[in-house]
Amino acid sequence: MHLLVFDSGIGGLGVVREIRRLQPHARITYLADNGFFPYGEKPDAVLLPHIVKLIGGAIGVFKPDAVVVACNTASTIALVALRAVYAVPFVGCVPPIKPAAAASKSKVIGILATAATVRRVYLQDLIEKFAPECEIHSLGTPTLAELAEQKFRGFPVDVASAVAPLFMQPGAERIDAVALGCTHYTFLHPEFQALYPHIAWFDPALPVAKRTLAVTQDLAPAHGGYAGTAWFTAPLPDFDVMQARLAEFGFYEVRQGLPAAYTSRRIF
Ligand code: DGL
C-alpha cells in the first residue's frame, strides 16, 4: 500500500510518524511544498488552484493508493475540490475541536491555527457541529509554523510571544483545552505544554493517522515498506541537516524539485 502524504513543509511529518507506528508496512511518499510555504499567509484564491494542481500532478506521477492531506490549511480549502476531481481516497486534517470540546470542563476552548484556517467557514461549521456549547477563542498566527520549521532544523525557539495573544482575549483565562489547528504545531507541542501545563493541548497527528488506517486497511500492505522518498518542491538550503532529520522519519531518499514526468504531465 502506497500513501502520498502532503504538507507545505515539515508539519505532515508528525502525521507520518503516527502512520508509521500504526501501519509499519505502508510505503510513504512525502511531498512538501516548501517552494510555496507558508500557506497560512496566502489568499484562498491563490491557494486553491495551486494545491489542486500540485496534488493532482503528484497523484499522476506517484500513483498512490490514498492521499493524506496532512495540512489543515490545504484540507480546509481544497479537500472538497480534490475529492471532486480525483478518484483516489483522501484523508484530510481538521483542527481537533471535537476532542478539545469533549475534554473541556470550563467549556471555554482555544484554537490555534494559521490565519488562513482561522478565517475559514469550514472552521465555523466544525465549531457548530462539535462545540456548540463552548465559548471559542481562536488565534491565527503567522509565526508558529515558521518556528516549527526552525525547531525541526535544530534551532532554539521561543513560542511565548506568539501564543500569548490567545490568552489575552477577554474571557480566555478560562480556556482549559486548545485544539492545534496546524500540523506544524505538533513539533511545538512540548513548548506549549511547558508554558501552559494546566491546559490540555490537542494535536491532530494521531487522529489523522487513525483515520488513514481506517480508510486504507483493506488495501494490500506493501512489501519491504517503511522506506520512502521525501520530495521538496524547492531546493533546501540546509539539505544535509534535513536529510539527517528526514531519515528519522523513514525517508532515506530526499529529492528537491519535482519529478521530470511531473512538469511535462497534463494535469486536467
Ligand atoms: N502545516 C500547515 C497546516 O496544517 C500550514 C503551515 C503553513 O504553510 O502556513 O495548516
Image (cartoon, rainbow, N blue to C red):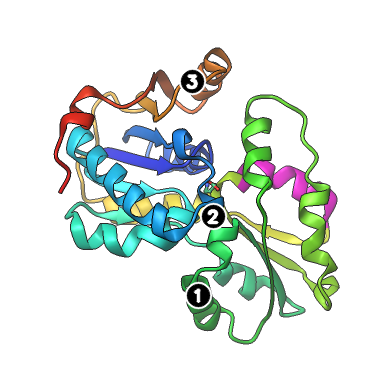
Q: CA distance from mark 1 to mark 2?
A: 14 Å
User: Relative to the observer, which residue lies in front, 148 or 211?
Assistant: 148
Residue placed under numbered mark 1 in the picture: 126
Three-letter code for the amino acid on which mark 3 is drawn:
Ala
In the displayed image of the protein, which residue is found farthest to the bottom? 133
Percent position of residue 35, x then y: 45, 33
Could you classify mark 2 by the number of other residues whose Cα lies within 10 Å: few (under 14), some (14-19), or many (20 or more)? many
Q: Which mark is residue 247?
A: 3
User: Relative to the observer, which residue lies in front, 195 or 162?
Assistant: 162
Does residue 33 belong to the magenta stretch?
no
Three-letter code for the amino acid on which mark 1 is drawn:
Leu
Question: What is the quadrant of residue 231 in the picture?
Answer: top left
User: Relative to the observer, which residue lies in front, 119 or 82?
Assistant: 119
Q: CA distance from mark 3 to mark 2?
A: 22 Å
- Which residue sits at x=33%, y=32%? 29
Tell me whether the residue at label 3 lies in contact with that at label 1, contact meaning CB atoms closer than 8 angstroms: no
Tell me whether the residue at label 3 lies in contact with that at label 2, contact meaning CB atoms closer than 8 angstroms: no
Q: CA distance from mark 3 to mark 1?
A: 35 Å
Label the magenta part by its dominant secondary structure.
Answer: helix
Three-letter code for the amino acid on which mark 2 is drawn:
Pro
Please state the extent of the stretch shown in magenta in the rendering: 185-197
- Which residue sits at x=47%, y=50%? 71
Residue placed under numbered mark 2 in the picture: 204
